Image (cartoon, grey):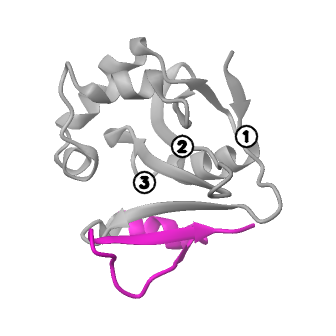
Amino acid sequence: MPTQLHQLSFSRFHPNDFEEYLSWFADPELDQQLGPMEENDPWLEYVMSNQDGTDFAVFKDGEMVAEIGLLFPNQDNPAYYITNLAVKPELRGQGIGSVVLSAIKILYPLQRGASWRCFVHKNNHKTRAFLEKNQWNCQNEFPNEEGFFEFVCIP
C-alpha cells in the first residue's frame, strides 16, 4: 500500500515500475552516475530480493517522478544508507529530490544514535552540491580509496 507524504506517493519498487525507470537511463547524466542499466539488468532482481533494505518508486499525480534505495540499520551499523536517488530527468531542478529526502526521513524516523548516510563519487559534483544544499555534511576532506565521499545527515 502506498504511503502519501508531501503530495508524493511512496510504494515499494515493483517489477512493473522497471520499464519506466529504465527509460530514464537514456539520459546521459543519469546513466553516467547510476548506470548503465539494461533491460535484463540484475539490479531489478537484487532490488526485489534485498532483505537489507528497500527501494521505492515515488509518484506524484500518478506519474513516477523519482526512485530511492535504502539500506536499513543493523546491529553493526545504526545508520540508514541511501544507495541511490534518481529523479526523472525531465523533472530535475523542481525540488523533487529535496522533497523525497525530507519525506524518507519521515517514513523512517531515526532512533537514538542513528544517522542518515550516503556515498557520492568524487566526480559527481551535482549530487554533492545537492546534498550540501539539503544540510548533509561531508565526512571526509578527501575521497576514500574507491573515490567516494561520505555524507551524513543527523537531525
69 to the left or right of 78:
left
Mark 2: give few (<14), some (14-19) or many (20+) Cα within 10 Å: many
In this rendering, the count of numbered labels is 3
User: Does residue 139 show up magenta in the picture?
Assistant: yes
What amino acid does circle 2 point to?
Leu
User: Does residue 85 show up magenta in the picture?
Assistant: no
Q: Secondary structure at mark 3?
A: loop
**Which region of the structure is painted magenta?**
127-155
117 to the left or right of 43:
right
Q: Residue furthest top?
A: 16
What amino acid does circle 3 point to?
Gly
The CA span between labels 1 and 3 is: 23 Å
**Which residue was labeled with disc 3?**
93
Choose between 61 and 133: the one closer to the eye.
133
Indicate which disc, 1 or 3, sits on the residue closer to the N terminus: 3
Quarter containing the N terminus = top right
What amino acid does circle 1 point to?
Leu
